[in-house]
Image (cartoon, grey):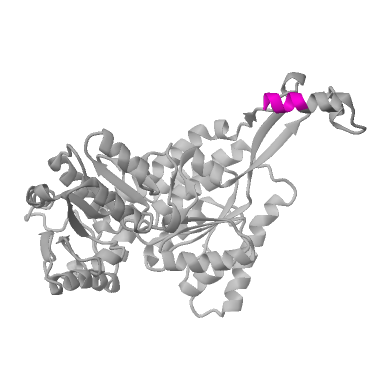
Amino acid sequence: MTELVKDLSDDIIDERLSSILQTQKKQFVHSAYVSASLREDRIDRLIDVLVRYESEICDALMADYGYRSKDQSRFAEVVTSYKPMKIARRRLKSWMAPERRKTGFPFNVSGARAHIHYQPLGVVGIISPWNFPVNLTLTPLAGVLAAGNSAMIKPSELTPATAEILSEMMSDCFDPSEVAVVTGGPDVGRAFSAQDFDHLVYTGGEAVAKNIMKVAADKLVPLTLELGGKSPVILGEGADLDLAANRILFGKTFNAGQICLAPDYVFVPESQLKNFLQTMKAKATESFPSDKGFTDYVSIINDRHAQRIKSYVTDAVEEGVEVLELGPWPDGTEQSRNIVPVTIIINPSDNALASKEEIFGPLLVVRTYNGIDDVIRHINTNAKPLALYYFGRKGVECQRVLDETSSGGVTVNDVIMHYTMDDLPFGGVGMSGMGAYHGFDGFKQFSHARSVYEQSRFDIGAALRPPYGDAFQKMTKILMRLS
């Protein structure tokens, strides 16, 4: 286990991080090639350790959150991490195969060949967040290892028990020259982001991402940033309110809305507002019956974030906005201290905190509308979100939303689910992030696409070399005509 404790000086922290990094980089000094068999073995070890540590992962998350449904933890952290690893293992050799490209006339007819060879970048740093600390470490790690890289991981200090388990897991199945975990607070995080990685992945908030970009720029470290934003939901033409309410509620209650992809606000046709609210209330009662309390729910990660979310509700009430609580409710026990019920805030002003800030909790803003033009205009005048959700028929209106708005990804007639499609790249755009991973796109993100051109033995390029004459003029005319 690799651990950095709080009382070390910045110089010593940097020295230890640099030492781990240099140990990993030495692997690539003599050869950048990493065999398919070694990559497969590393992924197999990762799969094995995830399965073996399932119970410890769920227990650690319960300890870190105060209360987190073990069923949600198992699904969110184990099941959804297992799948991308298995896909990477199964498809690895086909991903590694050289990708053939066209050479163009006249070289194509003379036997020349062009390929893309995907090479490891080297050492990839992963800074993972607290909301899904295992999944958002292991999912990018699957792509990093499939691409033949080594990895250094910095888990969030807000989930210390889970960070400890991650450290034990990686120590259990990897040599530190392959994968190393470093733990610690913001001082370690700052030193970590300043290392000379070959690539750095950060999942988290916008403010920290800006600082990481500034530091990374000094060493030209390429970045993948997975951030967030206020992801909208549109109830459009022909939307099934019962289906929409069920799925929106799931997106808002899973991990108590502490998801970068959680629906942040919903556009509801004004004529459908009453029906939508009644349906949401009914679905909440079904999902969280009174006899089960908050058994299937999740606490807010800590007191500070719980108070932040509650302040948005207080702000809305003081503004005179209608607020509707759907449950589940805390029962007064210490275990339920940071349970915040799902709460709908109806038509707040643009200056309300719930309108301006990314909620990252179980609050849902509902806005009524009368025409899709107003919805599109509202979305486009704000920062590009990580996700956009549309409920309705796949007709002209749906196509307008797809064509005339921009977001990291889209799910139609559901929320969040595009993240679970491993053949789709996952990533943001604009303020919601840069770069993408998952599946083959993750393999490519963490690889160098090396161009390789094999020239023909026939010297058909002779006409393009001086001294220039008639053959040169004819060849240039042919090339322009056939381009």
| Residue 437: x %, y % from top left | 48, 46
Give the percent coordinates (x, y) of residue 134. Answer: 40, 54
Q: Residue at 15%, 72% (x, y): give it.
A: 319
Reply above or below: 31 against 99: below
Q: Nearer the viewer, residue 44 or 249?
A: 249
Point out the image quarter for the C terminus.
top right
Image coords of residue 389 (percent x, y) = 28, 46
Is residue 5 toward the left or the right of residue 261 in the image?
right
Q: Residue at x 32, y 60 (%)?
A: 61
Picture quadrant where residue 414 is located? top left
- The residue positioned 11% from the left and 51% from the top of the image is 273
What secondary structure is the magenta-colored segment mainly?
A: helix
Q: Residue furthest top?
A: 109
Q: Residue 320 placed where, x, y %? A: 11, 71
List the single residue furthest toward the right. 467
Front position in the image: 219 or 44: 219
Is residue 418 at least partly visible in the picture?
no
Foreground pick, 162 / 369: 369
Give the number of marks.
0
Q: Is residue 153 visible?
A: yes
Magenta residues span 477-483
On screen, residue 109 above or below 151: above
Q: Specify whether residue 248 is painted magenta.
A: no
Identity of the residue drawn at 69% across and 24% down:
481
Q: Is 1 left, or right, of 396 in this rendering? A: right
Residue 478 among magenta residues: yes
